[in-house]
Amino acid sequence: MIVTAPPLPMLGTMAGFRRFTVNEYHWLISSGFLTEDDDLELIEGYLVHKMARNLQHDRTIQRSNRKLLTTLPGGWDLRIQSAITLIESEPEPDISVVRGDDSMYDRNHPTPPNIGAVMEIADSSLPGDRTDKGRIYARAGIPLFWIIKLIDRQIEVYEEPSGPTALPGYAKTTIYKPGDTIPLTLDGTVVATFALDDLMP
């Protein structure tokens, strides 16, 4: 069986690299050109290697996942290192808080209207999480973005996204340190609070 590729118009280049649309990225996956072994995600049209995970990173995911699941209100669910679909990106946040349950996403990944929060666990990936991930999440209007920083045991919480402006970003940043309590806000309401030390090993 011959699979016909969709048209691949040039979207611009960066140092000779080609950009892809989200639909083209999906086609590359469904056709088998990209597999899980490639360990890539789509960021602003570019195929970007995901950072390798260390033991502390994985322990933090497990601890945060366990704590969040026990406190999320009805109508919300967690996704771990699973794709979300934005206009020109398809990142795989370490943790996403999304509406509904798994059955809502049998055919499609969550999109911005169904995403309450995204969380990235950062050590060497911190600069990229702050700039690249922060920019694409703010452009998409995702209301809450956490960076869980392993290096100094802090959590940066970003709120009030700009939306699709020329220089997307978050207007409000709060930094939480060991001993602090962190609120989780969904749809403008604080639905739970967490001790920072409960989320990090």
Image: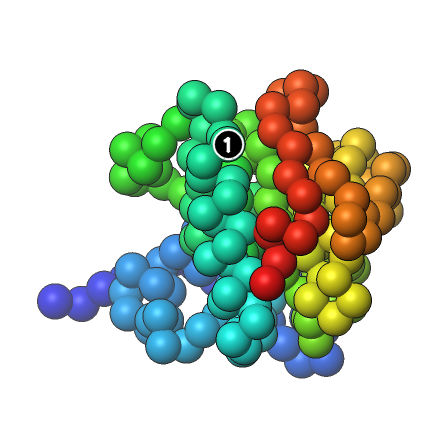
113 and 77: which is toward the camera: 77
Q: Is 130 situated left or right of 190 in this image? A: right
| Residue 111 pos. (x, y %) | 50, 37
**Label 1 crowd bin: few (<14), some (14–19), many (20+), radius 10 Å:** few
Q: Is 62 situated left or right of 179 in this image? A: left
Visible residue check, residue 24? no
Q: Going 45% across and 52% down the picture, which residue do you hit?
A: 80
Q: Going 18% across and 67% down the picture, which residue do you hit?
A: 2
106 and 153: which is toward the camera: 153
Q: Secondary structure at mark 1?
A: loop
Please tell me whether residue 90 is drawn above or below residue 108 in the rendered image: below
Looking at the rendered structure, the kind of residue marked 1 is: Thr
Please tell me whether residue 120 is drawn above or below residue 13 in the rendered image: above
Indicate the quadrant where residue 189 lies: top right
* Residue on which the image places disc 1: 71
Please tell me whether residue 159 is drawn above or below residue 74 in the rendered image: below
Q: Going 84% across and 43% down the picture, which residue do you hit?
A: 174
| Residue 83 pos. (x, y %) | 46, 52
